[in-house]
Image: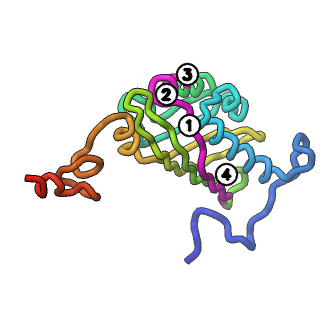
Amino acid sequence: MISMTTAPLDRRRVGNRSTGSAGLPDAAVERAALERFYELLFLQDHEQVLDLVTDDVLFHAPWQLPGLPTIIEGRAELHESMLWWSTELWSPGSLSRITVRPFATAHAWLAKVEGEFTALESERLYHAMVLSEVRFDGGAIAEVRQYHNTLNQIIALGADVPGINVPGYGVGSNRGQDEAVA
């Protein structure tokens, strides 16, 4: 079966050479920038994250925690959102794995990202798994469309969901444990 998300290996082309990257092809520079972007997000190094995005960056997370924006427009709004999200909810974390693949369209990437944060209040670990579509413009990140499992965040922040992370009716390894105790 042919993947519709990326170009077949025999049809992938590296972009034009970048004048400011010591001769590295644009694709290699963009891949490195994308990997660095997520590493810095997990470390909560907001200033360096902002150096990697355009002034009019668009960040879209369609399945977001209640109260958080699903669309962030512009560098200033991204900075404000990152500060609130990190200082209020999470301690700095670490990126554990990232896989980056080019789309068939130039300057567009698919990133599969994994890492860990610890919730400040509950002290529960959040194993983040994110799938992102990222577009570059002029060597900087111009658009991010990010998908993640909000339920994992909610549980890490302190929620108990019967049958998921505590005994009760639902799915998973905790399903029906309360009936066995009774």
- The one nearer the camera, 132 or 112, is 112
On the image, the x and y values in percent for residue 100 come to 65, 55
Q: Nearer the viewer, mark 1 or mark 3?
A: 1
Relative vertical location of residue 57 with respect to residue 97 in this rendering, above or below: above
- At label 2, the amino acid type is Trp
What are the residue bounds of the magenta stretch?
83-103
- The one nearer the camera, 71 or 41, is 41
Q: CA distance from mark 2 to mark 3?
A: 9 Å
Q: Earlier in the sequence, mark 1 or mark 3?
A: 3
Q: Nearer the viewer, mark 1 or mark 2?
A: 1
Q: Is residue 89 magenta?
A: yes
Q: Are marks 1 and 3 in contact (CB under 8 Å)?
A: no
The numbered dot on residue 85 is 2
Relative vertical location of residue 167 with respect to residue 55 in this rendering, above or below: below
Looking at the image, residue 121 sits to the left or right of residue 79; the answer is: left
On the image, the x and y values in percent for residue 26 come to 81, 50
Q: CA distance from mark 1 to mark 4?
A: 26 Å
Q: Are marks 1 and 4 in contact (CB under 8 Å)?
A: no
Q: Which residue lies under the disc numbered 4?
A: 108
- At label 3, the amino acid type is Glu
Looking at the image, residue 170 sits to the left or right of residue 58; the answer is: left
Q: Earlier in the sequence, mark 4 or mark 2?
A: 2
Q: Which residue lies under the disc numbered 3?
A: 80
Looking at the image, residue 138 sits to the left or right of residue 170; the answer is: right
- The one nearer the camera, 172 or 53, is 172
Q: Nearer the viewer, mark 1 or mark 4?
A: 1
Magenta span: chief secondary structure: strand
On the image, the x and y values in percent for residue 54 come to 69, 32
- At label 1, the amino acid type is Gly
Q: Nearer the viewer, mark 4 or mark 3?
A: 3
Label 4: few (<14), some or many (≥20) within 10 Å? Answer: many
Most distant residue in the left direction: 182
